[in-house]
């Protein structure tokens, strides 16, 4: 459009100006409107995408059209939008077989629901603004798809390291991605830098396939010349794919190993458990001879034994082991193992030998039987212990778990009763654990008994007294076992002493008497070799009579005091009766006259309690009860009581 004052300022123009005006009026002339369209739009497969085409000048009237450019460059109109004032009217003209179809939103933008790989095209936005001109812009749509899980198919055959050319290792596939992924190979986690060109050391090939869905799949095959070091190597592949905004993703396959064929280079041959570090095995054990070559696949093993420099084949197997059940000493000798590998180099030693040493220990032999009897105080008594075995065993003597010495000979000098007991000879081998034997004998010491006396002291101090009880104990030992007897009856039978070395003990409990004090008590131990005795002496034994007299006197005094009390009581009751318990004095009433008591009365129950030696009331007589009372009372009572009835 021309500015408003164009006509007012118009002047005759030269031909060139008119030509420019004519060109401006032509439909293909330079546009005076512009649109904003993103040149590249990226979206993940299945996600919606919106293509925006916005006029920058915002004219009042325009027509906006969307075109799809196919692979040949031909444009196909998809939709159009017309603006009249503030109203927008849009129409979709061609769906191009897309499902779901193209859409226009309220702002005239082209919407592609659920982006597909087939949508990856150039989309052209054409803006026609009448006199303002026409302009267009292109948006390139890229659709990304993450491929499926990476799969690897290794070569399950046996690959020989002796081949001089690269062999197929595995094939790796990455399917249904967009754009096409690329594949890399790894050994023990390290990237394998192999070229695409064929060579004898290693290379890889790749092939890309476009699926019917429009997605792309890639297959890569790895070729390598395997080495023996690859026998334990872990291989895998990884597919790399592109994402929007320049990002990348990676999907690794599962690891795999190769089965390789390589010749034997080293052979090992050894004795398996149970064995010692010195190579000894115990007689009677079951052992294994193990042979191992480092070739693959596992070679054949031949086990043999050398006898008179000749090989005696024992077994042939693929496991590389020979079991000997319950070996015996006759199986000691040289054993061999040979690996049957015909691909091995000539300089490789395929045969190995070892020396099998079977340790044994026979039952021990003693120069004496299970019992040895010697005389007391014997000298130079020796016992020998022999232990046939291989390797030579170590001998040790013990008694009651107390070490006595090492070596085959046990010397006993001098022999005492303490020497009696059980002696043990133990044979062992430090180089062969748990291989040992024991043998024991019992030493009996013949001799006259040995006696030991023990006397229980009395509890009272100051010596022994008749009637004291005492317990006497005698202990003896010897062989044969001594018999213990007492000079007094009552001795208990002899019994072994707990924890004693051959001691027996007997005890006697009795009461001490003067006769025992003079004679003593004898304890005697005897056996066929002799007898020995011990006499228990008590010394002076205090008699029991002195103490008895004191006791009798005490009883008499007590009885006399009791009688006096009774007499006094009686006299008090009889006061007031004539002639009863009265003292005869000068000027006293004549005999026979009653004397009144101070109380002036007399109880009837007091009559006739005390009477003289006769019914006639004799006086001055001796031996009567009244006389004893008078003597007991002294001056208080000098007369006798007589009856007043």
Image: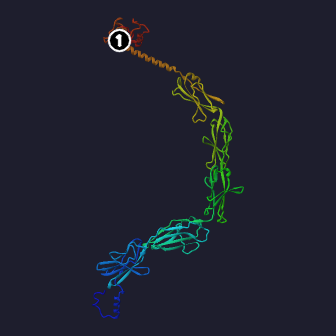
Would residue 49 be seen by someone viewing this image from the given angle?
no
Front-most of 223 and 290?
A: 223
Regarding mark 1 in the picture, which secondary structure is present there? helix
Q: Is residue 406 visible?
A: yes
Seen from the viewer's position, the closer of residues 642 and 505 is: 505
Residue drawn at (35%, 13%) of the image = 573
Image height of 274 relative to 102, above or below:
above
> What is the quadrant of residue 89 in the picture?
bottom left
Tally of numbered tags = 1
Residue 429 vs 613, above or below: the answer is below
Question: Could you say where residue 606 lies in the image, as x and y percent from the top left?
Answer: 35, 12
Q: Quadrant of the N terminus?
A: bottom left
Taking depth in this image into account, of 67 and 270 the one nearest to the observer is 67
**Looking at the image, residue 292 lies above or below residue 15:** above
Placement of 596 over or under 504, stated as above or below: above
Q: Position of residue 257 (x, y in %)?
A: 55, 65
Is 387 left, or right, of 622 in this rendering? right
Residue 360 image point, x, y percent: 66, 48
On the rendered image, what quadrant is the C terminus found in? top left
Taking the view exactly as shown, the residue that stands out farthest to the front is: 97
Res 63 → quadrant: bottom left
Residue count near mark 1 (Cα–Cα under 10 Å), binned few <14, some 14–19, many ≥20: some
Extreme residue toward the right, this view: 308
Residue at the spot of label 1: 606
Q: How is the image coloured?
A: rainbow
From the top left corner, tell me how far across and down residue 540 is, in percent: 56, 23
Frontmost residue, 507 versus 640 = 507
């Amino acid at each position: 459009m021309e500015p408003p004052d164009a006509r007012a300022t118009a002047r005759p123009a030269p031909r060139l100006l008119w030509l420019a005006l004519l060109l401006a009026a032509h439909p293909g002339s330079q546009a005076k409107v512009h649109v904003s369209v993103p040149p590249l739009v990226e979206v993940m497969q299945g996600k919606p995408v919106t293509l925006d085409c916005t006029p920058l000048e915002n004219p009042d009237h325009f027509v906006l059209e969307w075109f799809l450019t196919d692979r040949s460059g031909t444009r196909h109109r998809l939709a159009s939008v017309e603006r009249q004032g503030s109203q927008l009217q849009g129409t979709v003209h061609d769906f191009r077989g897309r499902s779901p179809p193209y859409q226009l939103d309220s702002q005239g933008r082209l919407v592609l629901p659920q982006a597909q790989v087939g949508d990856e095209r150039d989309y052209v936005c054409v803006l026609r603004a009448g006199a303002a001109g026409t302009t267009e812009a292109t948006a390139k749509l890229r659709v990304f798809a993450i491929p499926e899980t990476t799969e690897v198919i290794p070569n399950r055959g046996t690959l020989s390291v002796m081949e001089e050319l690269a062999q197929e290792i595995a094939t790796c596939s990455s399917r249904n991605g967009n754009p096409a992924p690329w594949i890399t190979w790894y050994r023990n986690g390290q990237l394998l830098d192999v070229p695409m060109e064929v060579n004898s050391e290693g290379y890889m090939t790749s092939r890309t396939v476009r699926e019917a869905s429009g997605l792309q799949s890639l297959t890569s095959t790895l070729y390598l010349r395997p080495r023996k070091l690859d026998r334990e190597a872990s291989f895998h592949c990884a597919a790399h794919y592109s994402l929007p905004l320049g990002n990348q993703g990676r999907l690794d396959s599962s690891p795999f190993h190769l089965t390789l064929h390589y010749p034997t280079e080293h052979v090992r041959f050894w004795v398996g458990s149970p064995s010692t570090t010195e190579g000894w095995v115990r007689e009677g054990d079951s052992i294994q001879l193990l042979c191992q070559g480092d070739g693959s696949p596992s070679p054949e093993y031949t086990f043999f034994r050398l006898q008179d420099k000749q090989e005696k084949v024992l077994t042939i197997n693929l496991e590389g082991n020979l079991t000997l059940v319950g070996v015996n000493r006759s199986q000691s000798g040289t054993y061999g193992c040979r690996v049957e590998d015909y691909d091995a180099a000539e300089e490789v030693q395929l045969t190995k030998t070892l020396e099998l040493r079977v340790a044994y220990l026979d039952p021990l032999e003693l120069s004496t039987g299970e019992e040895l009897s010697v005389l007391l105080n014997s000298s130079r008594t020796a016992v020998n212990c022999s232990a046939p075995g291989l390797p030579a065993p170590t001998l040790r003597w013990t008694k009651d778990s107390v070490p006595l010495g090492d070596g085959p000979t046990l010397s006993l000098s001098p022999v005492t009763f303490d020497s009696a007991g059980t002696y043990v000879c133990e044979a062992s081998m430090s180089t062969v654990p748990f291989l040992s034997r024991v043998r024991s004998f019992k030493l009996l010491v013949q001799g006259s008994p040995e006696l030991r006396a023990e006397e229980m002291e009395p509890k009272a101090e100051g010596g022994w007294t008749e009637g004291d009880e005492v317990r006497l104990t005698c202990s003896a030992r010897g062989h044969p076992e001594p018999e213990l007897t007492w000079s007094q009856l009552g001795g208990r039978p002899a019994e072994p002493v707990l924890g004693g070395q051959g001691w027996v003990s007997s005890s006697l409990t009795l009461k001490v008497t003067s006769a025992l004090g003079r004679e003593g008590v004898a304890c005697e131990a005897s056996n066929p070799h002799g007898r020995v005795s011990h006499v228990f002496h008590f010394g002076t034994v205090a008699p029991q009579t002195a103490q008895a007299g004191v006791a009798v006197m005490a009883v008499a005094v007590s009885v006399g005091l009791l009688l006096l009390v009774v007499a006094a009581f009686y006299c008090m009751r009889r006061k007031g009766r004539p002639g009863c318990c009265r003292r005869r004095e000068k000027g006293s009433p004549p005999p026979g006259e009653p004397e009144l008591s101070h109380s002036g009365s007399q109880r009837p129950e007091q009559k006739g309690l005390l009477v003289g030696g006769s019914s006639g009331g004799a006086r001055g007589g001796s031996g009567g009860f009244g006389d004893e009372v008078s003597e007991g009372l002294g001056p208080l009572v000098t007369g006798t009581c007589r009856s007043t009835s």
